[in-house]
Amino acid sequence: MMDGKQTAAIPAPGSDDAISPLSIQDLTVAYQRRPVVWDVDYIAPAGKLVAVIGPNGAGKSTLIKACLDLVPHVSGQVLFFGQPYRRVRDRIAYVPQRTSVDWDFPVSALDVAAMGLYRKIGWCRWVTRKYRAMALQALDRVGMADFADRQIRQLSGGQQQRVFLARALAQDADLYLMDEPFAGVDAATERAIVSLLHELRSLGKTALVVHHDLQTVPQYFDDVLLLNLRLVASGPIQTAFTATNLKRTYGGKLSLLDQVGARIAGQS
Amino acid sequence: MRCDVLHFRGSESGRTPGLFRRACVRMLSRNVLRLVLIGLGLGWGPAGVCQAAETFAWEDWQRVLLLQDAQTRIVMLGTIFLGISGGVVGVFMLLRKRSLIGDVVGHSALPGIALAFLLGEMSAPGHGKSMGALVTGAFVSGLAGALCVMIIDRFSRLRADAALAITLSLFYGAGAALLTLVQRVPSASAAGLTTFLNGKAASLVAADVWVFGLAALGLTVLVVLLFKELALLCFDVDYAATTGWPTRLLDTLLIGMVVAVTVVGMQTVGLILVVAILVIPASSAQFWTDDVRRLTWGSALIGAVSAAAGVMISAAAPRLAAGPVIVLCGSALFVVSFLFGRRHGILWKWLERRRLRQRIGRHDLLRACYELVEAQSQEQHASELELISTRITLEDLLQMRSWSRKTLRQLIHRAVQEDVLEAKPDGRYHLSPDGAALARRAVRNHRLWEMYLITYADTAPAHADYDADRIEHILGGDLVRDLELRLQQQEEQGLPASPHEIPSPSSPGKI
């Protein structure tokens, strides 16, 4: 849980840390003058499922967006696989929040999944049959092949989420950044996403997942990153997901948190 | 033990892209109406409806429909090209939620035209009206207007609608001021500039058609080549950016295409109405399809058809200016699409809802009949004979559900017409053999659905379908057999066959 302090030093190129899928150094992000992410240092372990947790407004989504250059950062450096983002885009897949999508847009589930292949297809070329087959395969991996021709508005919330996971899968990346994939989905989708995450892990991929449901964290994830503007703690579930750290992350906002923490402590 | 713990889950308060979209949609709907009104005013106002009607003669129509005039042919070809390019580019403006940029670009082109004229007049008095200079001026200042909107939108707290309004009035004000200067220039050619405001399609010459054709071809090829890039930009900018597409470049390119359409269209439909060429075909096509590709071609088709129809009508009635009539034809197609569009037209929506209501009503009626008979039956299930022989009164049925007398009468009336129920002279009804079979199936499917919803509560709602007929089709044979087994077990245990309480007095032992 003291990882933050230990990794403040910039890793020397060639060291083990340099090939971490994601290393963040002194990252500060501010909207207007208000800091949203404050001086975060973090090195993601390779091949692990990492939950990013923290209260509302803690900067979880912003952290991910800042890593992907979607919001400008005031200071700090972010390296993916030891390189700046624009050099290794193809190895990173991003699943945005469901609320940021225009559901009335005239595209089918298959079209959305195929978007994950656009980089591979390249400029000025159409999506040929070969790529459509690949997109269908990605849909199949999330159990959505039967809905390939549906316009995205006609899918349920969980199905929509799975389509966007299929798009990220189609990218065939090594690092997946997911912004609340579990928000507002049905139990079947939740199971599908979890088994997909486990499948990704078994393929040696890394996933950083913004997560809201504290009680499933130990069940679904290997590692945790506790964030509340600053990095509170990070590391494996056993050492970092403790009652003390949760209290430091969420403050006195929730007295019931003590119970959660106590129960978790009792389990481990 | 898990469920007692507080579920700590909330929603992130983020930016709201919906606000901007809603504002634009609102402005768009207002704008379509405005365009129609302007079109009406320009088209009919000066001429007067009566005068225009007098000039309509059969010979004129014949001449026009057979395209006997060389000039009509030229004008028509030119405007069709314009319609196609406007339709194709407009789709992406619409999908990018920036339809009104077209309006800004149109108005912003005015100061460029006036300035280009004045500069030309200064260098060579009397020859200021060089088409090339005017077009360049229009292009540059139209682009400047659009970029101005993007800059205000990006670097200030103002919402996009305010940015649009500010830029539009700023540039149009500058243009109007410059035009008053132009009027003082003694050369006679100055008067021609105002035609760019409302357009003058009749003045098109063969050389213009070449330019229009090339522009339309260029824009269409560009859209075909960059189709997936543009579609991705419109659908999900953030994702496009993270995967490495140059979103700002693509956005600028899109604006450039809008400016090109505006410049091509200013001679025909005029700067004020050129936004209609962009917005109306694309909006109309949206009612017909849920596929970007078909949307684009549909929009191009609608643009071309409204251009051709507009030119024909204005050629047959020479007092009508072509530009506004083209816009009016487009508006007519919009209204047709709005009403009858196969995908989102309101007529189909209404029909669909009515059909669903009727089907559910019939199911409810059949189930009510079956359950009435079942309640009176000695057996576990109502037998075939009981189903068709038991007489049912309206009052009995009225007890079964919370329907009004009027609704029930309508349902029964339709059921009798469909030979599902048979009416007896004493005012009572009984199920026909067909009706009995249908009722049995409706009840079975309904109970299976309920069993499914109870058994698979966590996943079920995503699959549940009001149209209970298709249960096997949706859930698959294995699952349905499993559900049937569960239902059977439940009945054998003496539990209620239907989870609903049946308030009929003769219902034995229902909970």
Image: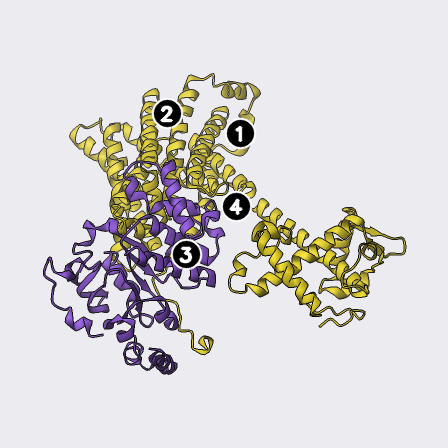
- Residue A199 % position (x, y): 35, 57
Toward which corner of the image does residue A224 lie, by quadrant? bottom left
Q: Colour of chain B?
A: yellow
Q: Position of residue A73 (x, y in %)?
A: 20, 61
Mark 2 or mark 4: name the one nearer the start of the chain: 2
x then y, percent, for residue B287: 50, 43
Identify the mark nearer the N-term, 1 or 2.
1
Residue plotted at (78% across, 62% down): B374
Q: Which mark is residue A161?
A: 3
Q: How far separated are the C-alphas under marks 2 and 4? A: 39 Å
Q: Is residue A161 left or right of residue B123?
A: right
Q: Position of residue A171 (x, y in %)?
A: 31, 48
Do discs 3 and 1 share a chain? Answer: no
What chain does mark 2 sit on? B
Q: Residues within 10 Å of mark 3 (few under 14, many from 20)?
A: many
Front tag of 1 and 2: 2
Q: In which image quadrant can residue B9 be found?
A: bottom left
Of the two numbered discs 1 and 4 on the same chain, state the one appearing first in sequence. Answer: 1
In the rendered structure, the answer to whether residue A250 lies left or right of residue B425 reads left
Query: What is the C-alpha distance between the residues marked 3 and 1?
Result: 61 Å
A41 or A34, nearer to the observer: A41
Do tag 3 and tag 4 residues touch (Cβ < 8 Å)? no
Residue with the mark numbered 4: B344
Spatial separation of the CA atoms under disc 1 and disc 2: 22 Å
Q: Which residue is mark 1?
A: B51
Crowding near the residue tagged with mark 4, few <14, some 14–19, many ≥20 C-alpha atoms within 10 Å: some
Mark-to-mark CA distance, 1 and 4: 39 Å
Q: Amino acid at mark 2?
A: Ser
